[in-house]
Amino acid sequence: MAKPRSQFICQNCGSVSNRWSGKCDACGEWNTLVEENVSSGVGASPSAAKARRGHAVELVALSGETDDAPRILSGIAELDRVTGGGFVPGSALLVGGDPGIGKSTLLTQTAAALARQGHSVVYVSGEEAVAQVRLRARRLNAIEPDIGLAAETNVENILATLEAGKPPALLIADSIQTLWTDQADSAPGTVTQVRSSAQALIRYAKKHGTVLILVGHVTKDGQIAGPRVVEHMVDGVLYFEGEGGHHFRILRTVKNRFGPTDEIGVFEMSDGGLRQVANPSELFLGERNEKAPGAAVFAGMEGTRPVLVEIQALVAPSTLGTPRRAVIGWDSARLSMVLAVLEAHCGVRLGQHDVYLNVAGGYRISEPAADLAVAAALVSSLAGMPLPAQSVYFGEISLSGATRAVSHTPSRLKEAEKLGFGRALVPKGSLSRDEGKAAARSTALEVLEISELTDLAGRILANARKKHPVPGEE
Ligand code: TYD
Ligand code: MG
């Protein structure tokens, strides 16, 4: 028998190398390479399995008719939104997130929601004992007779249990990092084990039309494999995020073979579990201090949904040789760009100032459309002049200092109007597009088109010079 070969596999990204090194060449993480035995299972050399002659499969035309995938709606609207309109039978979903963020809570509630509609559910917990899962379910008011529960970590045992009965509509495996299979030689939690176990469960789900949800902890230290190593094997990847001190959580689609990938679901963690937040803007703007300088309301979009959120900037003279730039909730490279444009084209000197930027409520913005709101917040903080409370901002800024129109202008305006704002500052050209024209006619907002960033900076600074806050910016 051939000597088992060992390889070094990064527990963060799954890349394989032949020798150990302190830093993974592929993902740049430190101390994540672990020696794994690959004589069998995923990553094994072809000689490990006895060669078998394949058989011919029928080729079909791509143009053939196929019905839309049927869906199982959970009835939790925020969850159905991120899955793209419900679970697809036979598909596998990965729910990733930091430990303690609420993954088990969400899935217990999902299990109960499906069981209430008469679907059978199996919840396999590899982390908690049966009593713990029961206690949580009782607290969540999620005790349903159709949920089968097992505390098991061996994949062969799980599959044998499932094969013994009718296939469930939903199978939850919490978490993939605790699962292990006899098929792989490595220790539980390693990339090889996690992949082999996930593959075995996915095969079962595809064969029986079961919806499979795998839970994966995001790991920082690289001792156990992260959820990224199975992302390519599943049909959908959802990440559950939230900031430590805040009790709302965002479920974000990262990959979806059956729907869009830019949707979010917003939840609030309470004593009775996760509660849906149907109108996130009200939540993010809830604690707004309208009189503070350096705060601008950004009319953003998450997928098809508008979200209004406050951007806070603090600009203060620096005592350091290299001033500090700290950003929470936005891209720091993007902030550097906005600062550079302010310096180069608007005469706003920030080179001797520390700059802190924060997106309120622990929310994270990924859109470039936030540029204009960020610039407004920065200039407002530098000038010590609050922005008019009833204004919202959105738009991209180009390196030349000009503004650029962004998509979804009507939805953004509509949401701002709904929340009682009176004015929107938008890039030039936003209203000349067809959708923009219709939006301008239908909205009660006063829409001001800004063509150059310097116009906006000029307005705010001119107001500051007048020294008395006026409601408008003129
Ligand atoms: P949990 O779902 O166990 O997190 P994960 O599976 O992602 O590790 O949730 C953990 C946190 O949620 C825990 O700190 C307690 C809190 N929690 C509530 O605030 N309310 C609740 O009803 C439940 C069940 C949990
Ligand atoms: Mg858990």
Image (cartoon, helix red, strand yellow):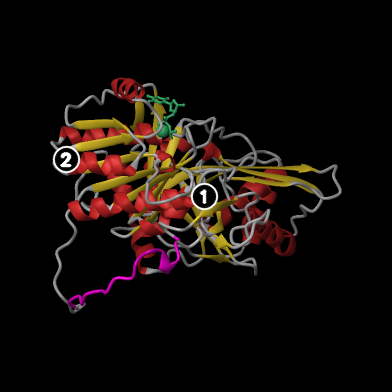
- The spot of residue 294 in percent (x, y) is 64, 42
Where is residue 36? Give x, y as percent: 53, 53
Which label's residue is closer to the chain start, 2 or 1? 2
Residue drawn at x 18%, y 34% is 115
**Region rendered in magenta:** 43-58
Amino acid residing under circle 2: Ala
Left or right: 349 as drawn, with respect to 268 = right
Residue that appears at 23% across and 55% down: 206
Magenta stretch: includes residue 56? yes
Whether residue 120 sits left or right of residue 283 in the image: it is left
Q: What type of secondary structure mainly makes up the magenta span?
A: loop
Check the picture and name the quadrant holding the N terminus. Answer: bottom left
Which residue has dot 2 on it?
164
Viewer-side residue, 324 vs 258: 258
As measured in the structure, the alpha-carbon distance from the residue carrying label 2 to the one carrying label 1 is 47 Å
Q: Return the residue at label 1.
A: 365
Foreground label between 2 and 1 = 2
